[in-house]
Image (cartoon, grey):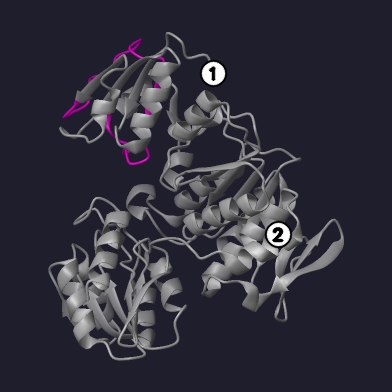
Amino acid sequence: MTNLHGKKVLVIGMARSGQAAARFLAKQGALVTGVDKKEKISGLKDLIELPITLITGGYPEIKAGDYDLIIVSPGVPRNIEPVQAAEAYGIPIWSELELAGRYIKEPIIAVTGTNGKTTTTSLLGYIFNKAGVPAEVAGNIGVPLIQEVERVSEHQKEVKYWIVEVSSFQLERIERFRPYIAVLLNLTPDHLDRHGDLKTYGRTKARIFENQEQDDYAVVNLGDSWLAEHIDAIPSQVCGFSRANLPDVGIGVQGDQIVYTFQGKEETLCTLRDVRIPGPHNLENALAAAAVSLLAGISKETVAAALSSFPGVAHRVEDVRVVDGVRYINDSKGTNPDAVMKALASFDGPVILIAGGRHKGSGLGELAQKIKEKVKALILLGEAAPLFRQAVLDVGFKQIWDVGTLTEAVQTAHDLARSGDVVLLSPGCASWDMFRDYEERGDIFRKLVLGL
């Protein structure tokens, strides 16, 4: 179904991706109804001039024959009544990712994983730009893919590759979405409040490979235990990456060198110290991006130069400022325990950690132990503060400060910090209890730090 003219389409969830999908569908001649359970939605005034029926403050009842297609936004729960009704009546349900994929003719590079998606996707865009290869970067990174499909089509812009960050929520509702190169960076517990368990979450992430064929590529982390156990189920050509050794096919580390082996040929790309973004987790992100770029035909010289100059991404272990010898780091995108542990591993000195927010169901035991090992003081805020407090008390850590606002958290950290310390905002939680999203949380943190 690519000719949607005259088709009755219901878009559920009218945030950024829902609005972009509704706008695109209306311009394709579809009969669009956009709905959201919230009464007030920002941005809807931009849709008023289009032939779109908007319903807010609840969902309509769905009966057989009402709609030909349902588009669900990533944040929409799977168990709401209109989704269940659509399933019962056999109405196709797509994510905005699936919708966009149906209108893309060029090769797609899709990146998913629990952590590192945005950094890897941004790094790929940076490398392709340095190589002079026209590529569009979109998806879960903050720019709806369907919005870019519409823009590229209207401006007849040349595109050779689409570089797309993909979430598990988007992958739940794909049918034919097929990347030429699919990347799965890692898998650790996250979003268990939605997926239920790691097995289900992993199966959902692995859907990124399910429509690939033998002439496509899968770039996977050989150091991830879950991926290593499921690698045989991948239908495409596997290219591994590892920061512990050198894969038979792929890219890895040999001494202090980054080396790749493709088609039986082994070549050195650069040294470890040439990779600018810090931390072992970012080394893995760099290896994945390098593997993808080399598979896409970009020269090793361009890839190596890009790895040495890429400055990183906002809200991902982002250096904000040094005040009186204290480094302030914005890792607002650290929304699960594994991300926090990776951020902590990036620093050798004492860390003052600001954490808390809306818990997503992951266990805190391993993180609590890492906090005991690495953290000088723990500052807690948000809904999950009591959970964090109990978890660290259980391992014998008692240097805890509870605060009511991020402003209070930054001031408390400033009062506690001494020269050589690191103040790290890495919440380990979603932001929705106090902020619109992780970006707003990180922006406020940055503004507060710059005001010290």
Q: Distance between the residues labelled 1 and 2?
A: 37 Å
Give left or right: position of 404 versus 141.
left
Q: Position of residue 365 (x, y in %)?
A: 35, 74
Q: Where is residue 409 in the image (x, y as percent from the top left)?
A: 19, 73
Give left or right: position of 227 versus 198.
right
Please indicate, yes or no, whether residue 221 appears anywhere in the rendered image. no
Name the residue beneath numbered marker 1: 2
Give the answer, above or below, for where 393 lies relative to 45.
below
Residue type of the residue flagged with mark 2: Thr
Name the residue beneath numbered marker 2: 302
Residue 268 is inside the magenta segment:
no
Q: Position of residue 422 (x, y in %)?
A: 35, 82
Magenta stretch, main secondary structure, is: loop
Segment colored magenta: 56-81
Quarter assignment of residue 59: top left
Give the answer, above or below, for where 52 lies relative to 36.
above
Q: Which label lies toward us, 1 or 2?
A: 2
